[in-house]
Image: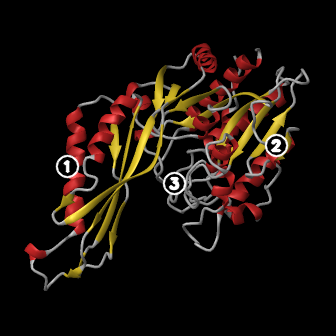
């Protein structure tokens, strides 16, 4: 069994954590921003230094490839993303890139034989922090999004700028022929932090990922009437925030009553208009996001959500709309077995685990065999500046990735 160099992993973590640093231990590195391009530049520089061939596609996805010993074989891919959420951590996404880099560096340095070309990938706009939706780069490449629609998506920081504008300005804009396709790629494995507390709580060092959970995401909106907060009688008001608060709490209670193991749900966004303390709100909207492996469980949640559509709540009309949803995506059994054999061979404590978060690999799985490797997140924290995984565990995950890829390469 092979292992990646711990000191090299430590150096990578320290280096990339300085790009877009917030000053509070985390990073803000929006996709296609100057900070993201700086991280991409370093990825390309390091990959060229080991003799990898660099290609970019029409979504600015980057592919760094070491040739294999048997010409004509399809590639095996690894990788993730270098962009982050606002005030995010130093491991989400970038660990998958650093892990893929470490694999190629280890193979090149030690002349480890391999039949297939091996490719490290940097996907564009995984987080969707400036340009929504998330995972545009992998989504277009795998046919989940229409490219023309994505080119029109407007920046949440500058409404005058579109995703297409940002792509045109990127030095990494390439050609469509360089995309990951089933004709050119045999499979893909992604290393990632867990972003939750399950591995740490179980005392396990590696998660062998089985699937990405199905998800429903809805918007619930309430239409009321704005009026003066100090002069309008209480019994005549149509307070949209009051209505929203009632329904929000009720939905959460009704979902709890389902008593479905592993079901999670979240209200992470609330919009209140006009958001002035002297005005009764006339328009309020909140999100409801729920995730579970079994689509029947999600149907139960959806039935609860939709039961409010068209109802009048404390004098306000309720409107329910789908934002976006996904089915559970199961990873390729053979590649999952390659990961499991790698973990077992290295002697790490491990478990099978599902991913509640979305990843580029869930889209890649639609067109080629795919698998994922998780390492623990301290206290389960992610998408925040406190996000942390010890360098030793990052290196362990990269070593699992290395041996899993080499096992898959024997096919």
Q: Which of the marked residues, 3 or 1, is nearer the chain's N terminus?
A: 3
Mark 1: secondary structure = helix
Q: Quadrant of the C terminus?
A: top right
Pointers 1 and 2 in contact (CB under 8 A)?
no
**Disc 1 target residue:** 250
Q: Is residue 198 visible?
A: yes
Q: Does residue 148 sit above or below 73 in this rendering?
A: below
Q: Which of the marked residues, 1 or 2, is nearer the chain's N terminus?
A: 2
Q: Who's the residue at 55% across and 53% down the image?
A: 133
Q: CA distance from mark 3 to mark 2?
A: 30 Å
407 or 222: nearer the eye? 222
Q: Position of residue 140 (x, y in %)?
A: 67, 46
> In this rendering, would 91 be left or right of 300?
right
Q: CA distance from mark 1 to mark 2?
A: 50 Å
Image quadrant assignment for residue 243: bottom left
Q: Is residue 263 visible?
A: no
Mark 2: secondary structure = helix
User: Which labelled disc corresponds to residue 203?
Assistant: none
Q: Residues within 10 Å of mark 2 (few under 14, many from 20)?
A: some
Q: Who's the residue at 60% across and 16% down the image?
A: 337
User: Which labelled disc corresponds to residue 178?
Assistant: 2
Q: Position of residue 166 (x, y in %)?
A: 70, 64
371 or 144: nearer the eye? 144
27 or 173: nearer the eye? 173
Q: Quadrant of the N terminus?
A: top right
Mark 3: secondary structure = loop
User: Which labelled disc corresponds to residue 88?
Assistant: 3
Of labels 3 and 2, the one closer to you:
2
């Amino acid at each position: 069994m092979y292992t990646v160099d711990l000191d090299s992993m430590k150096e990578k973590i320290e280096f990339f954590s300085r790009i877009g640093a917030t000053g509070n231990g985390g990073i803000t590195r929006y996709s296609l921003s100057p900070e993201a391009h700086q991280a991409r530049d370093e990825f390309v520089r390091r990959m060229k230094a080991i003799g990898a061939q660099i290609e970019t596609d029409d979504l600015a996805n980057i592919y760094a490839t070491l040739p294999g010993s048997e010409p004509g074989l399809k590639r095996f891919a690894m990788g993730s993303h270098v962009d982050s959420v606002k005030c995010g951590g130093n491991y989400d996404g970038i660990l998958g890139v650093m892990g893929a880099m470490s694999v190629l560096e280890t193979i090149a340095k030690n002349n480890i034989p391999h039949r297939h070309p091996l490719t490290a990938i940097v996907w564009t706009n995984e987080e969707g922090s400036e340009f929504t939706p998330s995972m545009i780069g992998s989504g277009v490449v795998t046919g989940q999004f229409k490219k023309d629609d994505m080119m029109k998506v407007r920046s949440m920081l500058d409404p005058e700028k579109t995703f297409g504008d940002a792509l045109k300005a990127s030095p990494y804009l390439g050609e469509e022929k360089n995309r990951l396709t089933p004709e050119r790629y045999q499979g893909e494995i992604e290393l990632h932090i867990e972003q939750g507390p399950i591995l740490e709580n179980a005392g396990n060092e590696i998660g062998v990922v089985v699937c990405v959970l199905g998800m429903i995401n809805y918007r619930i909106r309430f239409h009321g009437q704005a009026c003066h907060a100090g002069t309008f009688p209480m019994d005549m008001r149509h307070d949209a925030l009051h209505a929203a608060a009632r329904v929000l709490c009720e939905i959460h209670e009704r979902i709890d009553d389902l008593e479905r193991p592993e079901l999670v749900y979240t209200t992470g966004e609330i919009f209140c208009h006009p958001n002035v303390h002297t005005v009764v709100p006339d328009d309020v909207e909140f999100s409801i996001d729920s995730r579970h492996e079994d689509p029947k469980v999600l149907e139960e949640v959806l039935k609860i959500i939709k039961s409010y559509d068209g109802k009048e709540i404390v004098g306000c009309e309720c409107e329910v709309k789908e934002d976006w949803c996904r089915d559970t995506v199961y990873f390729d059994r053979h590649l999952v077995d390659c990961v499991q054999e790698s973990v077992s061979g290295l002697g790490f404590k491990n478990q099978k685990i599902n991913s509640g978060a979305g990843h580029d690999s869930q889209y890649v799985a639609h067109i080629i065999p795919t698998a994922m490797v998780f390492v623990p997140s301290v206290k389960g924290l992610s998408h925040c500046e406190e996000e942390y995984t010890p360098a030793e565990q990052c290196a362990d995950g990269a070593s699992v990735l290395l041996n899993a890829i080499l096992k898959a390469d024997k096919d």
